[in-house]
Structure formats: C-alpha cells, structure tokens
C-alpha cells in the first residue's frame, strides 16, 4: 500500500494564541501566597521569585500520604540542598502528579519534602514559568500562556532525555535546544521531521505526541502519528490516530487537507477490509469523494464491491 508524502512538512508556522491567566494572590505575613490544589488537596504556596522548584514540609507530606493524596511510589530518594541562610538541609525527592491553580495545570512536577515540620510551602517562579511568561503587578500574578493551559514534566523529560533509537547531529542539536525551550513547537516540529527522515518512527511518535499535548487541536500531528505507526506495522494504533486526525480537521480546513484526508479514509478502509467490510466500503467511498483520481482507492473500492 503506497503512502503519500506528507504535505504538512512543507511549511510550518509556529502557532501562538494570545491568552493569559491572572491569579489574585493573598498577602499573609508579608509574603504572597497562591491558592493551589496538589493532587486534589487545597494548599497555599508562597510564590517565591527566587526558587526554581516546589517544596513542602514534612507535616503536609505525612498528611497527604496518610489520606491518599500521595502514593508510596511518589516518594523518591534522600537529597541535600542549600537554603537561603547558607545551611545545608535534608530532604526527600517527591513527584507531585498534579498542581492546579487559576485554571492552569502542572503535571508530574519534581518537588522536595523539607524535613522540618514548620517549613513553608514554596512554589518557584521558574516552575510556573513553564506555562508562559510571568508578569507581576502587586498581588496580581499574570501568566501569558499562549493558549497552553497545562505542562507535563514527564512528557518533556521523555522527549529530551530518553533513548528513542537512531539519531544524528541535527536531532541531537534539536534535543539540546529543547532543554531551554521545552514548549517551542517549531523545534519539536523539526525534531519530528528529522526523526521521520531517518525512519526513526518511535522517535517521531514521541515528538508528535508532544505536539498533540501543546497544540491539541492541530490535526496534522495525529495524521503523522498514524503514519508512523503504520510504518511500524502497528495497524491498531494507526487506525486510532487516523480516526483522531479525521475528527480534528475542521469543516473550513477540509479543502487544504483533501489529499491527506483522502488517504486517511483509504488507510482505515484498507486496514479494516478483513475485520469490518461494511466500514471499509463506507470509508473508501469517502476517500474517493475527496480525491476521485486516487488510483489505490479506486482499486480498493473495486475489490470491496465485487
């Protein structure tokens, strides 16, 4: 079965949506606090402009563990770190599955438990900064999110640091660039294309999946994932993502997606011909409606209807 060249790879313009979230912080004892939910538990964190991570006290950690807001597998290793007065403090690494605030969501955040019962709960500015540029005006904390209302550290780490097979110098340079620009969709787009150019389908799937997280309504990412799964021989996942691609194409976008939409319907028909002939016939007709001159689709329709 022939596969068309992906027309999406000709030009890609990074997508930015003007959006912002403003959080009204509360001033307590001279510091500003941000109301959050951590794994569903309401907590107030001090907004720390100088901190680069998240920390909670031993008191909160024990309460969360006893009441099901933390799991044993969320608890990591013992660590030592410097505190503001220069002393070295003991702590424990911790994975916080979700931190939500002001309609925004951080997932799989690496945090630390400070081994003191009265230690403050700190939310570092650079942690929130993963969601976008931060503006401060008194008790108003504004985050320019560019339309991205969530950030998953686990996805970022897997894309940047995991071993996903064949690589080259261009790919390694792009992966390095993601260390400082983890939400740059232009870099991720180039990374996905470069993986595909060397037929590293798993690497490409990892990059396209990141694109889906950042721009969930951008249809070509789903087509590209389906294309990669098809090249890996994983027909079940290819079917799932071709279907997702079809549902993501908006009515006013159909004309620019005609070639790839036609192929997606054809691929679903071809992959379904032995398990669901009725569906296969339905989808091959849709393929030909979009592209009547698609020779492979014409041949498949004859095979299915004879």
Image (cartoon, grey):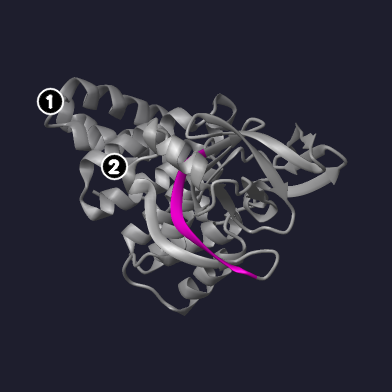
Answer few, some or many: residues within 10 Å of disc 2's Cα (few below 14, many 20 plus, some between 14 and 19). Answer: many
Q: Is residue 92 magenta?
A: yes
Instruction: Please identify the residue farthest to the right as the structure is shown.
Output: 138
Which residue extends farthest bottom? 169
- Asked which secondary structure carries label 2, the reply is helix
Q: Is residue 46 above or below residue 25?
A: below
Report whether residue 45 is seen.
Answer: yes
Query: Which mark is on residue 238?
Result: 2
Residue topped by disc 1 = 306
| Badge number at residue 223 | none
The boundaries of the magenta stretch are 87-98
Instruction: Determine whether 303 is above or below 93 in the image.
Output: above
> Residue placed at 51% from the left, 40% from the top?
60
Location of residue 286 by image quarter: top left
Q: Nearer the viewer, residue 206 or 92?
A: 92
Magenta region includes residue 169: no
């Amino acid at each position: 079965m022939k596969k068309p060249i992906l027309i999406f790879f000709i030009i890609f313009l990074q997508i930015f949506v003007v959006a912002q979230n403003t959080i009204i912080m509360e001033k307590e004892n001279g510091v500003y606090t941000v109301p959050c939910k951590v794994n569903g538990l309401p907590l107030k964190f001090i907004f720390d402009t100088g901190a680069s991570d998240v920390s909670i006290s031993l008191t909160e950690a024990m309460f969360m563990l006893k009441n099901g807001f933390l799991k044993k597998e969320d608890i990591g290793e013992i660590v030592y770190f410097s505190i503001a007065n220069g002393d070295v403090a003991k702590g424990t690494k911790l994975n916080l599955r979700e931190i939500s605030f002001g309609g925004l969501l951080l997932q799989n955040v690496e945090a630390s438990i400070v081994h003191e019962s009265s230690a403050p709960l700190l939310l570092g500015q650079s942690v929130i900064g993963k969601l976008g540029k931060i503006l401060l005006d008194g008790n108003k904390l504004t985050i320019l999110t560019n339309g991205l209302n969530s950030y998953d550290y686990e996805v970022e780490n897997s894309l940047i640091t995991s071993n996903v097979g064949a690589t080259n110098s261009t790919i390694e340079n792009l992966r390095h660039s993601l260390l400082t620009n983890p939400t740059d969709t232009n870099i991720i787009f180039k990374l996905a294309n470069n993986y595909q150019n060397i037929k590293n389908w798993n690497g490409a799937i990892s990059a396209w999946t990141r694109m889906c997280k950042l721009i969930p309504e951008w249809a070509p990412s789903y087509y590209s994932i389906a294309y990669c799964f098809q090249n890996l021989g994983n027909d079940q996942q290819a079917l799932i993502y071709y279907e997702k691609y079809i549902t993501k194409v908006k009515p006013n976008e159909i004309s620019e997606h005609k070639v790839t939409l036609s192929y997606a319907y054809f691929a679903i028909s071809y992959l379904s011909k032995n398990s669901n002939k009725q569906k296969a016939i339905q989808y091959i007709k849709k393929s030909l409606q979009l592209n009547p001159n698609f020779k492979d689709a014409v041949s498949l329709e004859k095979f299915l209807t004879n």
